[in-house]
């Protein structure tokens, strides 16, 4: 089996092949969250996903109007809850 190749900006496999991570954040953010939890995703891609997700501005809840990056610094437990981490 050929190794899966991914980069920090685009995916090169699966149903979202050649899609930009920033576009997937809007189109299917749950998929990016799922990728974060996979042990086969390389570090470059994980960093790209984290960067894209970190720039998302919430439009709900007590942190409405804040980026995920800001929330992760001020309320990391909220981000864990938001991403479905236990």
Image (tube, helix red, strand yellow):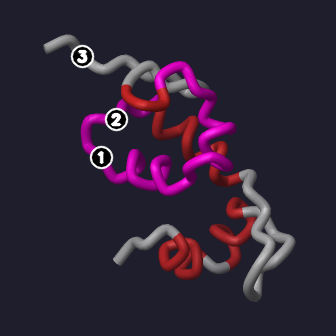
Q: CA distance from mark 1 to mark 3?
A: 15 Å
Whole-percent x and y of residue 24? 60, 41
- Residue picked out by circle 1: 38
Query: 74 or 19, which lies in front?
Result: 19
Q: Is residue 23 magenta?
A: yes
Q: Which residue appears at 73% of the width and 85% of the height? A: 61
Which numbered disc, 3 or 2, marks the residue that appears first in the sequence?
A: 3
Q: Are marks 1 and 2 in contact (CB under 8 Å)?
A: yes
Where are the magenta residues, as a range? 17-44
84 vs 26, left or right, is: left
Q: Which residue appears at 64% of the width and 79% of the height? A: 75
Quarter of the C terminus within the rendering: bottom left
Q: Is residue 74 magenta?
A: no
CA neighbours of label 2 inside 10 A, class few (<14), some (14 to 19), many (20+): some
Whole-percent x and y of residue 1? 13, 14
Whole-percent x and y of residue 76? 57, 75
2 vs 54, left or right, is: left
Q: Are marks 3 and 2 in contact (CB under 8 Å)?
A: no
- Residue picked out by circle 2: 41
- Residue picked out by circle 3: 3
């Amino acid at each position: 089996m050929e190794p899966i190749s991914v980069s920090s900006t685009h995916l090169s496999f699966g149903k979202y092949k050649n899609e930009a991570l920033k576009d997937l954040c809007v189109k299917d953010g749950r998929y990016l969250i799922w990728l974060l939890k996979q042990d086969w995703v390389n570090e470059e891609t994980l960093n790209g996903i984290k960067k894209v997700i970190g720039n998302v501005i919430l439009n709900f809840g007590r942190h409405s109007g804040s980026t995920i990056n800001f929330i992760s610094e001020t309320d990391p437990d909220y981000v864990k809850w938001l991403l479905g981490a236990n």
